[in-house]
Image (tube, helix red, strand yellow):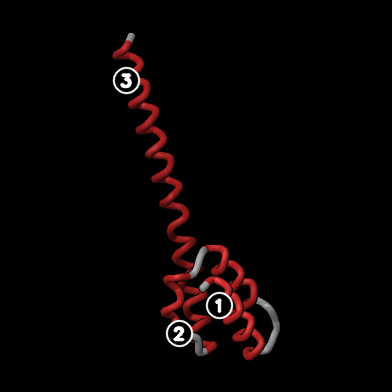
Amino acid sequence: MKTLAIALATVAALGTAGAVSAQDNLVAPALSMLEISVGNALNQLGIDEQVMGALTLAQLGEIKGILSTTDDPEQKKQDVQRVIDQGA
């Protein structure tokens, strides 16, 4: 009985690890695309891309939202800089 419990626990742990790994495989490319998109936009706005390493996923999302507006580039730059400064 004890062996069965250990075997079931092992299978459950391995199954969970596989599920997390599969989820990571789906999330990583999307995150990379978001980071590349925001990085390119920061470059176009004249903002140093070095800040990318310090940004949270929420900040990346907020910046992506700002970039999709029709505001003029200077307003976008100010809004993006505000998000970056709030995270610092």
Residue at x 53%, y 81% (from the top left corner): 41
Q: Is 24 left or right of 6, judged from the image as shown?
A: right
Q: CA distance from mark 1 to mark 2?
A: 13 Å
The residue beneath circle 3 is 7
Q: Which residue is mark 1?
A: 85
Name the N-terminal-most of marks 1 and 3: 3
Give amino acid for label 2.
Answer: Asp
Q: Which residue is found at the position 44% from the left and 60% from the top?
A: 29
Residue at the extreme left of the image, as rendered: 3
Q: Position of residue 34 (x, y in %)?
A: 51, 68
Task: Tell me which amino acid carries mark 3.
Answer: Ala
Pointer 1 or 2: first along the chain? 2
Q: Which residue is mark 2?
A: 48
- Residue 17 marker: none
Local SS, label 1: helix
| Residue at the extreme right | 70
Q: Residue at x 31, y 12 (%)?
A: 2
Question: Residue, x 50% and y 90% (percent of image)?
Answer: 46
Is 80 rendered above or below residue 33?
below
Extreme residue in the top direction: 1
Residue 20 lies in quadrant: top left
Number of the front mark, 1 or 3: 1
Circle 3 sits in a helix, a strand or a loop, which is it? helix
In which quarter of the view is residue 52 placed?
Answer: bottom left
Query: Separation of disc 1 and disc 3 at Cα?
Result: 51 Å
Label 3 to label 2, Cα distance in Å? 52 Å
Q: Position of residue 37 (x, y in %)?
A: 50, 74
Helix or strand or loop: what does disc 2 sit on?
A: loop
Q: Residues within 10 Å of mark 2 (few under 14, many from 20)?
A: few
